[in-house]
Image: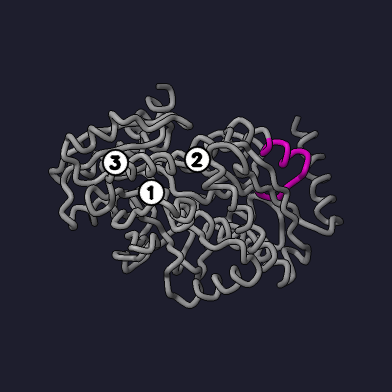
Amino acid sequence: MKKVYFIGLIFFSFQCRFNSTVKIGVIHSLSGVMASSESYLPYAYQIAADEINRKGGVLGKKIEIILADSNSKPETAAMLAEKMITQDHVSALFACWTSTCRKALKPVVEKYNSILFYPVQYEGLEESKNIFYTGSVPNQQIIPAIKWMNEFGFKRYFLIGSDYFFPRLANIITRDVIISNGHQITGEYYIPFNNKIGRNIIDEIVKNKSDIIINTINGEDNIEFFRAIDTLKINGNKIPVLSFSISDYELDLMKDISREGDYSVWGYFQILENKENQEFLKVLKKDYPSIKKISEPFLMAYISLKIWANAVNYTRSLNTNEIIDNIQYETMSSPSGPVAIDGQSHHLWKKVYLGRVNAQNHMEVVKFSNNLIKPVVFPVYKTKKEWGKIKAEIEYR
């Protein structure tokens, strides 16, 4: 087996040497329940690839994107990843929105010693030599968000999320933070994908005198949820919603629903006024005029490809281990502010911003961190072993 694998490596190196392009694999949900959030992310990789190619590409070759639709199915994403690595000979993968999808790809990239960039905020509690996580972890999103809500005087929290891994695990952390501050959880519900939001759930939010709703619903079900509470006149000025997956992009999909007064927390908002963001938005408007609104995952997808390309050109090689070693020391300025790869955890140091929806249904930044926040992948109030047990219980429920 070792001999065959060695011959395969020689063949792959031979191909890379004489091919005119360097291939990368992009796997996202272009259809299915996650398409509303995820289907426009491939444009971010194309913008980055175009920019890199104009400057000479990687190793003097142009980046070629191999794009595939996971149809919002993790098992499909895993199958596509294996095909891209073994048959298309991609040099890296850029993929997934949900944690379920990422978890399906993890054993694939580890088996073949490939590289995966994951651009979305998530529950943390995971590290892999072969994965770079450019989205936020709880201490860069959930925990500062709850701290800010406490400052605003909210004390009674209702938790609602999609019924899968990320919302359940994220809400364990959310619940711990709320209770440690002496505040209350008034209810907790999980909605299977593509299910209606029951009137009984909304009635309980009101009946239990909730101050604020913590929303970890993902994909198209967010639209259903906000329509349901809007119909019953639950708006941001009455009982605001704090979301971890709603940005100007999602608000633009709900133009007919006014969410003034709601909150969202991310590592990036389109309204940021720094020089890098203004230049990025100018390019977007000029070259991709159909894309009006973007989110942190969109930006992190763009940044991910830039980070990988920088490491390849610095290393002068497509060798996975050499690239990983060099990515670990990457820092760069970006539209969200400066970012840096944490060499130990493969997550990003980054800033966090709290947005509030204004009367025009756009996000305004009302709070932000002054400094970059180091990613704490395993919240320190439990050990890694304790977190591992909790993860296992959720995975096999």
Q: CA distance from mark 3 to mark 2?
A: 29 Å
Residue nearer the viewer, 268 or 395: 268
Q: Position of residue 46 (x, y in %)?
A: 67, 59
Mark 3 residue type: Leu
Local packing at callout 1 (Cα closer than 10 Å; few below 14, some 14-19, many 20+) is many
Q: Mark 3 or mark 2: which is in front?
A: 3
The answer to whether the residue labelled 1 contacts the one labelled 2, judged by CB atoms less than 8 Å apart, is: no
The answer to whether the residue labelled 3 contacts the one labelled 1, judged by CB atoms less than 8 Å apart, is: no
- Reading the chain from its start, which is encountered first: label 1 or label 2? 2
Relative to residue 261, is residue 66 depicted above or below?
above
- Reading the chain from its start, which is encountered first: label 3 or label 2? 2
Q: Is residue 68 left or right of residue 220?
A: right
Mark 1 residue type: Phe
Q: Position of residue 335 (x, y in %)?
A: 49, 69
What label does residue 232 carry, if any?
Answer: 3
- Which residue is label 2 attached to? 98
Answer whether residue 342 is visible to the viewer in this image: no
- Which residue is label 1 attached to? 244
Q: Which residues are magenta?
A: 80-92
Farthest residue in the bottom direction?
275
Q: Quadrant of residue 158?
A: top left
